[in-house]
Image (cartoon, grey):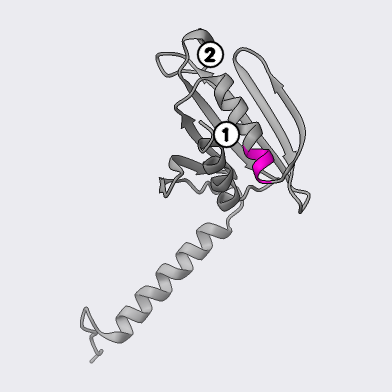
Amino acid sequence: MRPTLSPASPVRLGMCSAILGLSALTLVSLPGCVALVAGAVAGAGAYAYAEGKLESTLSAPLDRSYAAARRAISDLEFTETSAKKDALEAIVEAKTAGNDTVTITLKALAVGGGEGGDPSKSTTTKCSIRIGTFGDEKKSITILDAIKSHL
């Protein structure tokens, strides 16, 4: 006769925890697996983090968002290496003290919510932040907070 385990037995709970832990570890370690995190962080607001890149929508036109991104880079004492802007898009690049490359890409959103459109009527901007090759979610959120503090 085989012994049975009650649903709440310590052995069964331990086995379930181990299986869940190994499953999570396996998913995290798979290359090419997309980790998507959407949520609210104190001060950061809504954002999505996927494949090493943080994305958010800023409630400001492209010109103000670009100026805020450049001020944020300065506030965080990063070294700005490039800053380019046209009527629809802007890219700010910088280096951290650890020599990681920070790339902030800003795109004017059309009045209907898509990219492009008439920039003179755009009141929102799509903001993408990538740090280094693989990304850094915590640093990206810090940068997003710094950008939003200047809007």
**What residue is shown at x 76% (from left), y 54% (from top)?**
98
Q: Is residue 27 left or right of residue 52?
A: left
Image: 8 above or below 125 = below
Which amino acid, by three-letter code, is at mark 1? Ser
Q: Earlier in the sequence, mark 1 or mark 2?
A: 2
State the residue position of label 2.
Answer: 116
Q: Is residue 69 left or right of residue 116?
A: right
**What residue is shown at x 61% (from left), y 12% (from top)?**
87
Residue furthest to the left in view is: 6
Cα separation between marks 1 and 2: 15 Å
26 inside magenta stretch: no
75 inside magenta stretch: yes
Q: Position of residue 43 (x, y in %)?
A: 44, 45
Crowding near pointer 2: few (<14 within 10 Å), some, many (20+)? Answer: some
Image: 98 above or below 14 = above
Which amino acid, by three-letter code, is at mark 2? Gly
Q: Is residue 132 left or right of residue 145?
A: right
Crowding near pointer 1: few (<14 within 10 Å), some, many (20+)? Answer: many
Looking at the rendering, the stretch of residues picked out in magenta corresponds to 72-76
Tell whether label 2 touches label 1 (CB within 8 Å).
no
Q: Which mark is residue 97?
A: none
Q: Quadrant of the N terminus?
A: bottom left
Q: Quadrant of residue 54?
A: top right
Q: Position of residue 129 (x, y in %)?
A: 60, 38
Residue closer to the observer: 4 or 135? 135
**What residue is shown at x 52% (from left), y 27% (from top)?**
126
State the residue position of label 1.
Answer: 128
Q: Position of residue 137 (x, y in %)?
A: 56, 50
Residue closer to the observer: 134 or 116? 116
Q: Position of residue 46 (x, y in %)?
A: 41, 40
